[in-house]
Image: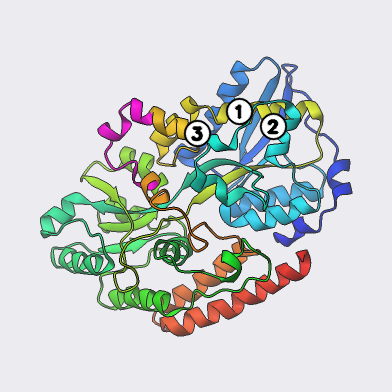
Amino acid sequence: MTLKTLLSATTAVAMAATPVFAASHSGKTEVEFWHAMGGQLGELTDKFAADFTAGSESCQVNSTYKGNYTENMTAAIAAFRAGEQPHIVQVFEVGTATMMAAGDKGAIYPVYKLMEDAGIAFDQSDYLPAVISYYTDTDGNLLSLPFNSSTPVLWYNKTALDAAGVAVPTTWDEVEEAARALKANGVDKPFSFGWQSWTQIENYSAWHDLPMGSEQNGFAGLATEFTFNNDAVVNHIQRIADMGQEGLFVYGGRRGDSRGQFVSGETALWINSSAYYGGFKADIKDFEFGQTMLPLDTAVADAPQNSIIGGATLWVLNGKEDAEYKCVAEFFQFLSQPEQQAMWHQETGYVPITTAAYELSKEQGFYETDPGTDTAIKQLSLNEPTPNSKGIRFGNFVQIRDIINEELEAVWSGQKDAKTALDTAVERSNALLRRFEDANG
């Protein structure tokens, strides 16, 4: 099953789908919500659905974990083809272009239209610009509801840094120097990261105001081509590879696989999502940790631009009854309330999707009791986004990230140098862009 399967679904199939979820045993109208949040995040996600259901006289939201982002999206595609799709599916940000193309074929019910049809007040200006800009169409209409948005930060083990006599690094030169001091002081795997395409190519490029591809990183059209094999990114990846040869960097796997290295103290500098905060707060007992902004490569830029988001949004699929969509709209209204978003932000480390939730967190004193937890918000709003730092919108990007992973792993293992690997990644990835353009142009 591939993401392209969804694009071949026709409007007729979508609209003819049998509403298999009609009413619950309680007599309430049922809504199926498929998500990709596991562990503590899954518990909080399920609680949103349960709390909404408890407070609604007519609606019941059934929240179901369907595996990681890719597995959840694949499950939704298979269900859509069978006419048994959920009402709501959580899709990570790199699936946006694919979902937009599906919307052009009638498979998607855009959020702005959903709220309008349901008669529920919905003001896009309430949402953080850095978040909604990623998910709007060319007319500025919001297509999916931001739910869990994060950005990568530099997590650090303050206890280990203090013991090694080094400050929290702010530049890549300082990261290298700190890693060397940490290694000398007994830290086994000084530096690592997760979600390597997102943190070391996508966000590295945005942070230094570099294009990752043409056509405004895909926002301006499907004829985009990748350019992340430029000298700045090549030199950056080669630096990390060289750090690996010296024992300063240890690759711990894709996604969040290397989280355990940081929690155990094996790694003292770790770049990954701000959304690890809740888990770290619960799991780390043996040392003091913190988060700070991404390091700057001073050979490339004098100052940082802004980082870009990761995470996911909630997409609504066509083919259901009006009463069910009314419940979806009411659930979305509930999720966007300042109280819900402030709780989500404070418990997880995801950014609040609305300005009101951010202000509420300030009023509640969260950033004073938990210093550093506003790092992600500051990074995202550091400067007015440029075409290079607004985000990315490439078709087939889920598969393209796999290509990037493969090529970077060849660098970390010493099989390829950075230039060869990134040139190959661009060539292979551009081929997938052309396939997407051919299918949706």
- Vertically, is 175 above or below 262? below
Which residue carries the number 2 mark? 115
Q: Is residue 368 magenta?
A: yes
Picture residue at 86% right of the left edge, 42% below the top: 15
Pointers 3 and 2 in contact (C-beta within 8 Å): no
What's the distance in space between the residues labelled 1 and 3, CA to CA?
Answer: 20 Å
- Vertically, is 70 above or below 248? above
Name the quadrant of the N terminus: bottom right
What's the distance in space between the residues labelled 3 and 2, CA to CA?
Answer: 27 Å
Q: Which amino acid does label 1 sit on?
A: Gln
- Relative to residue 373, is residue 64 drawn left or right? right
- Relative to residue 344, is residue 401 drawn left or right? right
Which residue carries the number 3 mark? 43
In this picture, which residue range is highlighted in magenta?
361-376
Q: Does the magenta stretch include residue 53?
A: no
- Relative to residue 91, is residue 327 drawn left or right? right
| Secondary element at image label 1 | helix
- Vertically, is 424 above or below 39? below
Q: Nearer the viewer, residue 422 or 65?
A: 422
Mark nearer the N terminus (3 vs 2): 3
What's the distance in space between the residues labelled 1 and 2, CA to CA?
Answer: 9 Å
- Relative to residue 148, is residue 323 drawn left or right? right
Mark nearer the N terminus (1 vs 3): 3
